[in-house]
Amino acid sequence: MENTKEMRKWLDDLGLNHPLVIAGPCSAETEEQVLKIAHELKDTDVNYYRAGIWKPRTRPGNFEGVGALGLKWLQKVKAETGLKTATEVANRNHVELALEHDIDLLWIGARSTVSPFIVQEIADALKGTDKIVLVKNPVNPDLPLWLGAIERLASSDIMNLGVIHRGFSTYEKSKYRNNPEWQIAIELQTKFPDLPLINDPSHITGKRNMIFDVSQTALDLNFDGLMIETHFDPDNAWSDAAQQVTPKSLVQIMEDLRIRKETDPEAEYNNTLNNLRAQIDVVDNQIIELLGKRMKVADGIGELKKQKNVAVLQSKRWNEILGKMVLEGEDKGLSEEFILRLFKAIHQESINHQEKIING
Ligand code: PEP
Ligand code: MN
């Protein structure tokens, strides 16, 4: 991908002195709801008004969107408030209807990005238009698949592009609705620093009280903007009730976020430093997560040793592990002394856990 500078022209042309903000309800529900939220967002930092018209639901039986009717409501939003509009498209028919109704920005949802057939169909339907298209990450953590969607659009001469990081599905329960896997966004940004990168803390967290922290991490990692689901009555929203915030909270969130601008060398230095620190925080969290996992496995071994009545300490196996880890560490530029100290500490913690299990 060579033209990432050109891909961000639409964003640079906005000349914003704050991150791009896309806000609005998860779903368009009624004309009144769509217009009421839009009017509440009118004189804020919001740049694009979002509302899902066709809703991809994991299981049937949930609200699946109002359909094309909602596009008229979005046109009204633009006429009455001047806010530019955004919606999700998932097939050729959606694209044609969105174009007819002059929607300004289209996004491809996480469930569509996984399918090259769908992405190609959307790219073909958009060929020759100057629409802004944002591609949400696929539900599975696959960077080439995500980038492949951008490439398909670029091959159809769609040049106003960007990506939305909305987290990844996991089988294991975590505190997030969709695990952020920040390292994937960091890798994407390292490879394509110009490609507009928007964070969607709503779908990452699934909970409104976690939105601020995820947004701050995204800004510290130099994301270009945020997409935040907003509703005047979040608890009674027809979809994604737990994660939507009121327009008033959205304004508060934007006010409280530390926004970094690269205006002078000192600010740029601080910006780079904060970015690197944010990356360290991501890795530190992963280390804790992994240590927790390791300890759970050790507990399982403890249970087994209890049943079979064998000693906790198995020094032969332990020396083998240490030897292997010293070699692996060397390969990564980590000293033998450090690896030995680190693994002795980890081992001691496992032994403490197992002793507890065996002795009651
Ligand atoms: C949405 O933005 O409402 C949506 C359905 O998102 P995702 O594709 O990230 O699940
Ligand atoms: Mn949603």
Image (spheres, grey):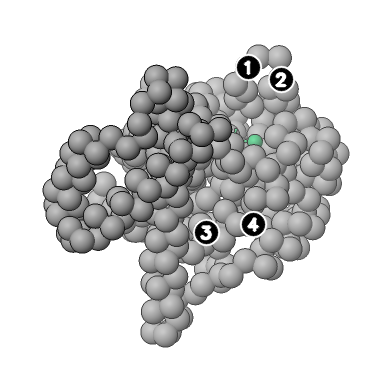
Using a 10 Å C-alpha cutoff, classify the residue at mark 2 as few (fewer than 14 neighbours), some (14 to 19) or many (20 or more): few
- What's the amino acid at mark 1? Arg
- What's the amino acid at mark 3? Thr
First along the sequence among labels 3 and 1: 1
SS of the residue at dot 2? loop
Q: CA distance from mark 3 to mark 1?
A: 31 Å
Is residue 213 toward the left or the right of residue 323 in the image?
right
Q: Which mark is residue 217?
A: 3
Q: Residue at x 85, y 39 (%)?
A: 32
Residue 319 in the image: state x and y as whole percent. 20, 42
| Image-quadrant location for residue 313 | top left
Q: Which mark is residue 59?
A: 1
Q: CA distance from mark 3 to mark 4?
A: 9 Å
The quadrant in which the C terminus is found is top right
**For ligand 1, which image quadrant applies?**
top right
Q: Residue at x 60, y 57 (%)?
A: 213
Residue 140 in the image: state x and y as whole percent. 42, 31
Residue 221 in the image: state x and y as whole percent. 45, 61
Mark 3 or 1, which is nearer the eye?
3
Tag 2 near tag 3, CB within 8 Å: no
First along the sequence among labels 1 and 4: 1
Please name the residue that numbered disc 4 is placed on: 212
Q: Nearer the viewer, residue 316 or 320?
A: 316
Q: Which mark is residue 264?
A: none
Q: CA distance from mark 2 to mark 1?
A: 7 Å
Q: Residue at x 72, y 31 (%)?
A: 239
Q: Which mark is residue 62?
A: 2
Q: CA distance from mark 2 to mark 3?
A: 32 Å
First along the sequence among labels 2 and 4: 2
Using a 10 Å C-alpha cutoff, classify the residue at mark 1 as few (fewer than 14 neighbours), some (14 to 19) or many (20 or more): few
